[in-house]
Amino acid sequence: MTCSSLPQPSPVAVRDELRRVLDSSFIPDDSLLAKMLTYVVDRTLAGDGRSIKAYTVAVEALGRPTDFDPDRDSTVRVAAMRLRSALDHYYSGPGAQSALRIRMQPGSYRPTFELVADVASEPPLVVDQIDVPAMPPALLSRFRLAMPSTRVWLATISAILAFDLLATVSLMAVQLRAPQAQAAQRWASAASEVQTLGAEKPNKAIGVLVYDYIQNHVQTSYGQPIN
């Protein structure tokens, strides 16, 4: 944490920290954010922090023309927000152990230089360094014997999937064959009845016999004669 009772960092320490920040991938050197950060740090170390405004940053650091209007052009405001976010990410990652930190406070283009006390006493948590209790060898051996091998699992799953696929195909085949079988049975029954009518009335043509067959079935189904 920061401590107000700590002495102010020296310009040499601030410039060293600035170099480390610019060497990181969070604020690459020669980028717009790097130019802005370098300018505001230099002006602050020179004791001219009060002259840091949106206009001076745009013209002197970012190379904007002298007719730059900060009220109409939000370049400096956007760059300041991006710079503030980049610094926060840097000190949350590779710069977490830095005893000196360069910050950009919201609503201001002037940087602050913070000394952090006891950063070494709170190292960042690394998952690989967490001690996990080891399983006793005897218990581990029993556990491995009790667990089926990968090949057994794959064979079992493959067998289940194959059985399921076979059952699905068989059911579809039965459903497709059922209407065809019923239709064939109805046609055979109709042909048999027509043949019976033909034997009873040998002098009638086949067309008349079929008509009589249809008439009889309609009368039977609806209980009404066909006129």
Image: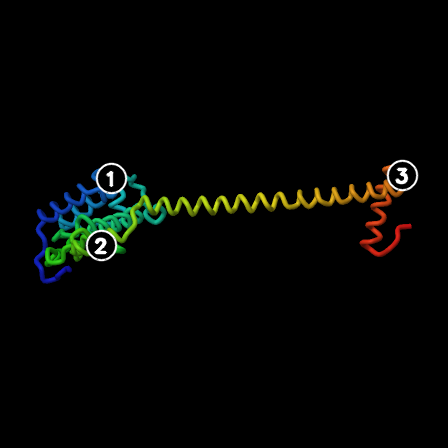
Question: Where is residue 80 drawn, in percent x and y?
Answer: 27, 49
Q: Residues within 10 Å of mark 3 (few under 14, many from 20)?
A: few
Disc number placed over residue 17 in the picture, else none: none
Give the residue drawn at x 45%, y 44%: 162
Label 1, on which residue? 31
- Residue 141 vs 36, above or below: the answer is below
29 and 37: which is toward the camera: 29
Give the residue drawn at x 20%, y 39%: 29
Work out whether mark 1 precedes mark 2 in sequence or the reverse, and give the earlier one.
1
Give the residue drawn at x 56%, y 47%: 171
Give the residue drawn at x 22%, y 50%: 87
Foreground: disc 3 or disc 1: 3
Image quadrant in which you'd find residue 120: bottom left
Label 2, on which residue? 142
157 and 39: which is toward the camera: 157
Q: CA distance from mark 3 to mark 1?
A: 106 Å
Question: Where is residue 185 drawn, in percent x and y?
Answer: 71, 44
Q: Amino acid at mark 1?
A: Ser
Q: Secondary structure at mark 1?
A: loop
Q: CA distance from mark 3 to mark 2?
A: 88 Å
Q: Secondary structure at mark 2?
A: helix
Label 1 close to label 2 by CB (< 8 Å)? no
Q: Secondary structure at mark 3?
A: loop
Q: Is residue 125 visible?
A: yes
Work out whether mark 3 precedes mark 1 in sequence or the reverse, and give the earlier one.
1
Q: Is residue 6 left or right of residue 64?
A: left
Q: Is residue 44 left or right of residue 57?
A: left
Label 3, on which residue? 202
Image quadrant in which you'd find residue 39: top left
Q: Amino acid at mark 2?
A: Arg
Q: Residues within 10 Å of mark 2 (few under 14, many from 20)?
A: few
